[in-house]
Image: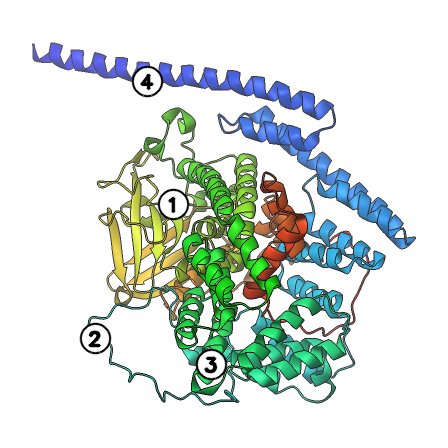
Amino acid sequence: MRYKTILLILVLVLSSSLAADNLEKTQKKELEAQVKTMTAEAQKLEKAGQWVEARAKYAESQALIEMKDVTEAIKRLDDEIHKRVKDDLNQAHKLYETRKFSEAAAGLDEGMKLGSLQSVIAYDMALCYYQIGQRDKALEYLGKARMGTPDPKQKQKLSQLMTYFTTGENSSAMNAGDKDRIARINRLSDSIGVDASLEDAEGSEEPSSDAGAAPAQPAPANAKPPASLHASVTASRRSSLCDALAELKGPLLNSPSVTFDLANCAETNGRTAEAVRLLEKYMQTSPGALDAGDVRARMADLKLLLGLPGQNGIEVRRLYASVYGSLAERKYDRALADLNKAADLAPDFALTKWKLGLLHESMGNIDRARENFNGYIQLSSEQSGKDEAALHLSTLEAKKTKYDQEVDAAGDIVADLFNRAMNLTFNESENRSALRAKRALVKKKQEQSAAKGIVGGFAVPFAYAQQQLSRASEHLHVALALFPLGAEANQLMGLVYLQANDGGSAMRSFDVAASQGLPVSFYAELRGHKQDEAEKVELTRDKVRLIALSSYDKNGKAAPPRKPAGADGLGDLIVEPNTARQQDFDSIDLGLADIKKVETDHGLLKLKLAKQDMYLSPIYLPSFTPIEGPQARRFANSYTRLFVRYPGLEDSKLGTEGMSGGEKFAMGMNLATASLDLATSGFTPFSALADLQDVIAITRTIQGAMASLSVSYAKWEKSVNDQQQLLAGKEFKSIPVEVANLEFVQEFK
């Protein structure tokens, strides 16, 4: 009887296994049938010459199942598109050399629609429009080129050319010492708030006084820290950009860009009258500057500030200086707090209400924006100002509705990708990823064995991931054009930037979330002794939290955590400001004292704890994850820097981003092979996002997205310009060190 029971159990198990196999085979056949239908549509588009649309249809089919013939079709189309774009560049180059700039720009515009070599095409279009005399449009395309360029040295060259386009300033003759000093200043201006501070030795024109103010009360012992999640970076670890500028001597001080940057420093350090004088000098040395209108508006605001009388006037000017510094460092919570203090000190000063309205509007806080714009209308004596505020008030509700729609659409796309990448079948339909049990590897066969212990996540077809990330970025483009400091959109944008291997841009987005009291996060696999788990990594100013999303068995099958990982199973992909959130997760919470150091270890992050080391392997979707060499270290460094920026783990160790001597030797000095950067791996969603700081392009985006509103293009442009003047008006200009080169290029070297 016992043997019969055992036999029956074996039969049942075998039958169950066969039933599961049959079910999977049935699912596979159904999916393959759907793919064949989609492939047929893609083939028709391909034959009709609609290559971009055909590629999109092929990539869409990979959401169901990855088939070899589809993968080969996508590669074929990529090759054809790349070849067509190279041909377009060749033809445009010939037109440019014969000074047919309009015809060259038109040809390049057609090439840009194909989605390959975007930054190079944008650069050449900038040159064409500059030669035509359309400097504003030239600057727009140059900004796109800069955003799409991964090389820091190339970015700096483009930044200097942007200064030339804006001011007409060219590099003057200078010695090697001056070039080195300016190169350092330009590097510092790119890292304000991270490696560079704006405080200088000169200080304020008007020493602060607390006369008439209530005496300061000591903070209670149990006082909570401020809402910001930015760590307080030790001042000694940062260099002063403004002190470095003050060291420049001689003719350099008459440079428009140096004058403009010194005005920024004067304004930020409380020397309001000096800032006005320097801005007036800037206008004299560069009378045709593209930003002349913004500079004039800025001077008008500063003169209003100088007109405030008495001790309260001194304190308001001090607070405004702090606001400008906080905006430059992207610490928006501090800027908001200081503006509120200024409003309390001078309640009848209309300018503060205006700036509070703009800042709240930028964050998507439409109720507070409405309150302050109405306050400005009551206080302002100028009808033009009242009309501007009324324009903002008339669009708040519609903008908020559209913003929410775009964020929801982007969130759905990003959530689906991460669910696939971590094989979280229990979060959605199991059919969606039933066939995705193969862990993502690397391209080189000799590295695949090592990659099994390093690469996080499971295989998602690269073409599909690239396409979906691009679609998410398009939705976020609209959302951020409406509310550039919207917390939800910036959380998603930070994740998308990480997928583009652009850590600097990711940090700019995450700064917005941190300033509104929200965690900065990314997704990774936790690796360690008998550990293999999917995690959402959350960084706050006082701890690091690893929220368990799943555990994996030796075959890669995912099991859900003991406690739900938020409502979405992803530990809350988006955390909304001022909204109650589940607190009890299946998580590892590490205080800062628990972490000795975070360091880059090849393509991994190593968390060195007192009794053990933990390894995090970031989830990377659009291309092969690097595991060795400078590419792997650059990749992991983007994440290690987050631990420095937000929890303030300043002893964290970055990996060397250049090639070691041994690596060069091992590669036979074939540096061209090593030059592949992940940011050029085929994922280029930012051709549409590169112009987010450009008023014309933002206005164009809003006008298209909000066509139902009866608002003229000119009014939209004014509304956007108001926000950008507040948020981006104090950006430092890169100082040219070389004579501007307007030669057409066919690749960045």
- Nearer to us of marks 2 and 4 is 2
Say which label, 3 or 2, has the lower sequence index: 2
- Nearer to us of marks 4 and 3 is 3
Mark 4: which secondary structure? Answer: helix
Report crowding for label 2: few under 14, some 14 to 19, many 20 or more residues within 10 A (C-alpha).
few
Q: Quadrant of the C terminus?
A: bottom right
Q: Quadrant of the N terminus?
A: top left
- Nearer to us of marks 2 and 1 is 2
Q: Which mark is residue 318?
A: 3
| Colouring convention used in this rendered image of the protein | rainbow
Residue type of the residue flagged with mark 1 = Leu
Residue type of the residue flagged with mark 3 = Arg
Q: Position of residue 99 (x, y in %)?
A: 90, 54
Give me the C-alpha separation between circle 2 and circle 4: 63 Å
Question: Which residue lies under the disc numbered 4?
Answer: 20
- Nearer to us of marks 4 and 1 is 1
Report the residue at 45% width, 45% height from top: 451
Say which label, 2 or 1, has the lower sequence index: 2
Report whether 453 appears left or right of 484: left
Q: Which mark is residue 573?
A: 1
